[in-house]
Image: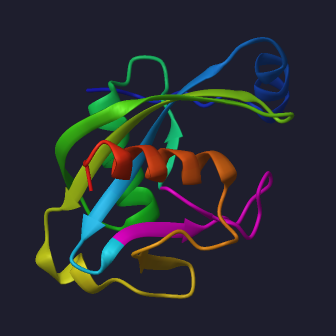
């Protein structure tokens, strides 16, 4: 069993100054489009983004994908396809993201739509820029 150890805020601030983070981002496909979440924290507070998160030591990408789906969306997912690796260098930190196409494993989540979680057929204007790039790439490569 994997036991997650979280870094303290002070440790996290130090590490992000010197090292990139390995992350997982999910393109969650439903019949109404792909799911985005309105970000509640800085950086990018108030912008729409793909569900995702930093992979912790001892955690696989697939474990992280399911953790993200359960924590941010409230359901488990089925991994459909690996989309690619994307890199985001911004002033806050450096992320290397492994992106997967996934589908909710429970059909009742096909019509999820709240103030903070919504299905989109096209990118909203207030979306994290590099997540727009990921969606554009997935469309160009016919993943969606």
Q: Is residue 103 left or right of residue 88?
A: left
Judge left or right: residue 102 versus residue 87. Answer: left
* Picture quarter with the C terminus: bottom left
Task: Give the residue drawn at x 43%, y 76%.
Answer: 120
- Is the residue 55 above or below the residue 101 in the image? above
Whether residue 131 is situated above or below residue 74 in the rendered picture: above
Return the x and y of residue 99 as percentages of the image width and height: 39, 38
Q: Position of residue 78 (x, y in %)?
A: 16, 51
Residue closest to the eye, 134 or 24 = 134
Q: Tell me what residue is drawn at x 47 percent, y 51 percent.
A: 136
Query: Which quadrant of the structure image shows residue 27?
Result: bottom left
Colour scheme shown:
rainbow
Q: Quadrant of the N terminus?
A: top left
Q: Nearer the viewer, residue 41 or 143?
A: 143
Residue at point 50%, 56% (across, down): 50
Q: Which residue is drawn at 84% across and 19% down?
A: 17
Is residue 43 covered in magenta? yes
Image coordinates of residue 75 in percent, x first then y, are 27, 65
Residue 141 part of the magenta-drawn span = no
Q: What stretch is highlighted in magenta?
A: 34-50
Quadrant in which residue 70 is drawn: bottom left
- Looking at the image, which residue sits at the far front? 140
Give the side of residue 132 with respect to residue 25, left or right.
right
Percent across and percent down for residue 127 are 65, 64
- Badge count: 0
- Looking at the picture, does residue 28 appear above or below residue 3? below
97 vs 8, left or right, is left
């Amino acid at each position: 069993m994997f036991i997650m150890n979280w870094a303290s805020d002070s440790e996290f601030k130090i590490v992000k100054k010197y090292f990139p983070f390995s992350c997982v981002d999910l393109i969650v496909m439903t019949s109404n489009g792909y799911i985005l979440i309105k970000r509640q924290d800085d950086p990018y507070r108030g912008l729409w983004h793909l569900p995702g998160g930093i992979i912790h030591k001892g955690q696989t990408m697939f474990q992280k994908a399911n953790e993200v789906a359960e924590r941010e969306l409230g359901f488990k997912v089925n991994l459909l396809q690996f989309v690619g690796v994307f890199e985001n260098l911004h002033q806050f930190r450096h992320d290397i993201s492994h992106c997967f196409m996934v589908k909710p494993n429970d059909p009742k989540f096909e019509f999820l739509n709240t103030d903070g979680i919504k299905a989109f057929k096209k990118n909203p204007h207030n979306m994290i820029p590099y997540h727009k790039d990921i969606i554009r790439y997935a469309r160009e490569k016919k993943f969606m």
